[in-house]
Amino acid sequence: MPFVKKDGPVILNGADYEIFNNKSEEGAQPKEGSPQFMYVRYNRDETKQWHVAWYSYQMAQRKYPDAHLWIIGQFSPEQIKYNFDFFMGEKYRYVGVLDNPIDLAEYYRGADDLLVPYYMDACSNVMIEALLCGTAINYDRGNCDSADEIAAAYEKDYKLLTAEHMTNQYIRQFARLL
């Protein structure tokens, strides 16, 4: 609804569980502070709301002076040059874009808390990957669209957020059309 004039099945995105998992034998990026926060976006889309994550981290840094933030993704040269508007000794490291999903999974496993201020993200792959890696998620329940459904699916059974489950759901729906 409303585009096809009826409700239908909703299939959540899924991540590759061979990469995105919290298995103890898998590597984790060493923490650089406590707690270790993380913000991830691939593109520079304003709906990813960096400014909200920035503010959340500002407040966390005051509550937890040893906190640290990993910033992962694409940002303007000006933001990088001017330290992401951090000017009061905030602890952070700009990682850049991680092209290898194994590297990204290691950051998820090393983080305590993922900041997810995304506005109307239909089904956040970042959130799914982080949950599968065992990272706590900090999101705005009013703005993140499917975040509640993603969190509920994870609580019910993590396998509901795997690529294998997603693929099986699509196959089942396609088979109904034949």
Image: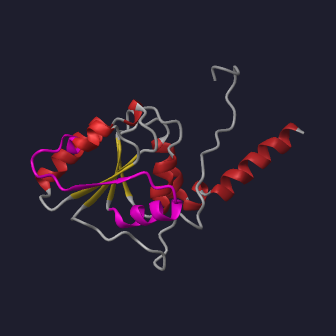
Give yes or no for residue 39 being in the magenta stretch: no
Which residue is outermost to the bottom?
A: 25
Q: Is residue 45 above or below residue 56?
A: above
The percent coordinates of residue 110 (x first, y second) are 36, 66
Q: How is the image coloured?
A: secondary structure
Q: Which residue is depicted at the point 22% across and 47% down?
A: 57
| Looking at the image, residue 61 lies above or below residue 46 | below
- The percent position of residue 144, horizontal first and vertical second, equals 42, 37
Q: Nearer the viewer, residue 98 or 163?
A: 98
Q: Is residue 85 left or right of residue 149?
A: left
Residue pictured at 54% horizontal, 60% vertical: 158
Residue 86 in sight in this render: yes
Q: State which quadrant residue 107 falls in.
A: bottom left
Residue 151 in view (yes/no):
no
Where the C terminus falls, by quadrant?
top right
x then y, percent, for residue 104: 46, 60
Q: Is residue 100 magenta?
A: yes
Q: Position of residue 1 (x, y in %)?
A: 64, 23
In screen coordinates, is 36 left or right of 117?
left
Label count reads: 0
Q: Nearer the viewer, residue 111 or 131?
A: 111
* Residue beneath the point at 45% across and 32% down: 120
Q: Is residue 90 left or right of residue 43?
A: left
Magenta-highlighted residues: 82-111
Is 108 placed left or right of 86 in the picture?
right
Identified at 44% across, 74% down, the residue is 27
